[in-house]
Amino acid sequence: MQTFETQITVSNQHLDMLNHVNNVQYVQWVQDIAEQHWNARATPEILDTFYWVMLSHHIRYKGEAILNDVITLKTFVTKAEGAKSTRVVEIYNQQTNKLLTTSETEWCLMSKTTHRPTRITPEIATLFS
């Protein structure tokens, strides 16, 4: 399975009233890296034909990040069957390599023409394996 990574430096906009990264920000980062991974791997034709919608999302908070921490986000797809895909995102403090958050999200592939679920094609499945 292919892993996709990106780094983010925590800024003031990411913080809550306790001066650590807001829980909602972690959820946004999960959404963002999934989209970045899709856009980086899919061809223009695939991007013009399909999109993903989130069906369910589970996130576990294990640690906190604060201002100026460098965060590494890693994502990979663990399952792709029918119209559904399961994606994992792990978020680490880059300096300490401490796992801060894990998430597992189930996505559904949609047709841009019909706006209905559609089976994951072999071409799409190989983008993430």
Image (cartoon, rainbow, N blue to C red):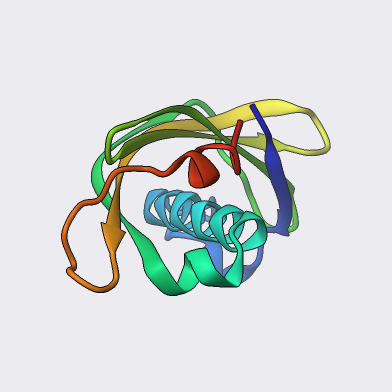
Q: Position of residue 70 (x, y in %)?
A: 76, 50
User: In the displayed structure, would residue 43 be above or below residue 88?
Assistant: below
Horizontal relation, residue 99 to residue 17: left or right: right
x, y percent for residue 23: 40, 48
In the visual, does 106 lie left or right of 115? right
- Single out the residue that lies furthest toward the right: 95
Q: Nearer the viewer, residue 1 or 18?
A: 1
Residue 108: x %, y % from top left: 28, 47
Give the residue at x 38% y 63%: 50
Quadrant of the rendered image containing residue 100: top right
Label total for image = 0
In which quadrant of the rendered image does the C terminus lie?
Answer: top right
Q: Is residue 88 above or below residue 4?
A: above
Q: Residue at x 66, y 60 (%)?
A: 40
* Residue ID at (49%, 64%): 46
Q: Nearer the viewer, residue 12 or 121?
A: 121
Residue sitting at 18 percent across and 67 percent down? Answer: 115
Q: Quadrant of the N terminus?
A: top right
Residue 118 x %, y %: 25, 50
Quadrant of the image occupied by residue 82: top left
Left/right placement of residue 56 relative to residue 80 reads left
Q: Residue furthest front?
A: 122
Q: Measured along the vertical axis of the image, is residue 48 above or below residue 3?
A: below
Position of 51 relative to 112 (above/below): above
